[in-house]
Image (cartoon, rainbow, N blue to C red):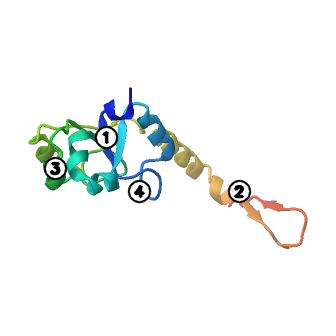
Amino acid sequence: MAEEELPGVLILDIGGTHGVLENLAALLKKHFHLITMKEFLGNKEEMSKKIQSIFVFECRPTIDRELLESLPNLKVIGNSGVGVDHLDVKMISSFGVKVTNTPHAVADPTADIGMALMLASARRLVEGNVLNFPDPTASSLLLLWHIS
């Protein structure tokens, strides 16, 4: 399909501090016509007709009534995170727009980190594994195990 035939998705930006990660944007471009907020604001009349979805990445772009009113063909807002606390789901639903998220995307990694931190704490790994550089000109490192 040509880019113009793909469903339009509004995103804040690609890359930079708050934009969608570039590798994620490359994946999205295979299935959607990505429209940045800058492009949308530069040509609201034309772009608003093309946008069927908004991809919220790191709570951006901000979804408010004014934005929803300017997107007559909007069908879904996809949030890349676990929760939707930053979205007014009731207001969004009043426009007939669905809201999705990824509720279990980080459950396993979070559990892994939690277990690793508990084990490190119980075995005092951080305090017991200290590198000490007594002489900056020395060619070897002295590894001190602090066990108290």
**Could one spot residue 27 in this view of the protein?**
yes
Task: Look at label 2 and name its amino acid.
Answer: Asn
Q: Identify the residue position indicated by label 1 in the image.
A: 9
Q: Residues within 10 Å of mark 3 (few under 14, many from 20)?
A: some
Task: Look at label 4 and name its amino acid.
Answer: His
Q: Identify the residue position indicated by label 3 in the image.
A: 70
Give the number of the mark in front: 3 or 4: 3
Q: Is residue 45 above or below residue 49?
A: below
Q: Is residue 12 above or below residue 107?
A: below
Q: Pinpoint residue 51: horizontal percent, then vertical percent.
A: 25, 41
Instruction: Give the number of marks.
Output: 4
Q: Identify the residue position indicated by label 4 in the image.
A: 18
Q: CA distance from mark 2 to mark 1?
A: 49 Å
Q: Are marks 3 and 2 in contact (CB under 8 Å)?
A: no
Q: Is residue 119 left or right of residue 85?
A: right
Residue furthest toward the left? 94
Residue furthest toward the right? 139
Q: Quadrant of residue 18?
A: bottom left
Q: Residues within 10 Å of mark 1 (few under 14, many from 20)?
A: many
Q: CA distance from mark 1 to mark 3?
A: 14 Å
Disc number placed over residue 129 in the picture, else none: 2
Q: Nearer the viewer, residue 54 or 100?
A: 54
Q: Is residue 28 left or right of residue 10?
A: right
Q: Disc 4 on helix, strand or loop?
A: loop
Q: Pinpoint residue 66: horizontal percent, then vertical percent.
A: 15, 55
Q: Pinpoint residue 124: horizontal percent, then vertical percent.
A: 62, 54
Q: Is residue 129 above or below residue 35?
A: below
Task: Look at label 3 and name its amino acid.
Answer: Ser
Q: Disc 1 on helix, strand or loop?
A: strand
Q: CA distance from mark 2 to mark 4?
A: 36 Å
